Amino acid sequence: MIRKIIHIDEEKCSGCGLCAEACHEGAIEMVNGKAKLVREDFCDGFGDCLPSCPAGAITFEEREAPAYDEAAVKASKEKAAEGKPMNEQDHEHKSGCPGSAVAQFERCAEREAAPTAKPVSRLAQWPCQIKLLPAQAPFFDGAKLLIAADCTAYAYANMHEEFMKGKVTLIGCPKLDAVDYSEKLTAIIRDNDIKSVTILRMEVPCCGGLQRAAETALKNSGKFLPWQVVTISRDGRILE
């Protein structure tokens, strides 16, 4: 049948996962860091996911699609509420943002060495939130930039010494801020004497939005700077 259904532009999708959380029917799933409409028969065409998308990657279209299956949606919700084991198809079509998945990490206190000296803050400037930073400031002159996801400071124990020391730190979360940082970052890199850029992100898909914004800014600035991306696992390791 021809009906109204959502369309997701993967090129625009930042991987934040907000649309998957907003879809009450479970029609949207995060796949390889991108939002996908995995169950057309679960999409009611009302578009609760549209206003949640900060990248404007979701629109309506009218095309051939299976009818909305309200009974199947209800059954899926009931199964999830009852905590029943998922079958293979359920696993394939489960919705939600991987970055919000609950996890607990075992920490052995006996193996964790006590600090030999009181830690020193390496934050070189204020403010540090990307949304609050001016496009030009004296501390940007000759600076090495660290563009870091908020969670990295909590996940990685030696954040200050290994990453922040000697750098100007810019932090943000594309999922919670729901903004495109690329314009602000472009202005900072373009209009100041920046020496290098380090992008520090978490392994979760929504952090891809921060990485893409920084890479877009580097490209749009017209400058050729040394830069690198470092990924931190949820349990606090640097991933190769």
Image (cartoon, rainbow, N blue to C red):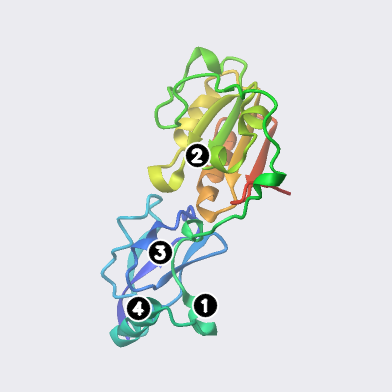
* Label whose residue precedes the other's in the sequence (2 or 4): 4
Q: Position of 113 compared to 141: left or right?
A: right
Q: Quadrant of residue 95?
A: bottom left
Q: Is residue 197 above or below residue 101?
A: above
Residue 64 visible in the picture = no
* Label whose residue precedes the other's in the sequence (4 or 3): 3
Instruction: Report the residue at 63% width, 46% height from top.
Output: 236
Which residue has dot 2 on it? Answer: 150
Q: Amino acid at mark 3?
A: Ala
The tag on residue 20 is 3
Instruction: Report the residue at 45% width, 23% height from top.
Output: 135
Q: Quadrant of the N terminus?
A: bottom left
Which residue has dot 4 on it? Answer: 77
Q: Is residue 35 above or below residue 67?
A: above
Mark-to-mark CA distance, 1 and 4: 14 Å
Q: Secondary structure at mark 2?
A: loop
* Label whose residue precedes the other's in the sequence (2 or 1): 1
Q: Is residue 180 above or below residue 56?
A: above
Residue 230 visible in the picture = yes
Which residue has dot 1 on it? Answer: 91
Q: Secondary structure at mark 4?
A: helix
| Residue 18 percent location from the top left of the image | 39, 57
Q: Secondary structure at mark 3?
A: helix
Q: Position of 240 compared to 69: left or right?
A: right
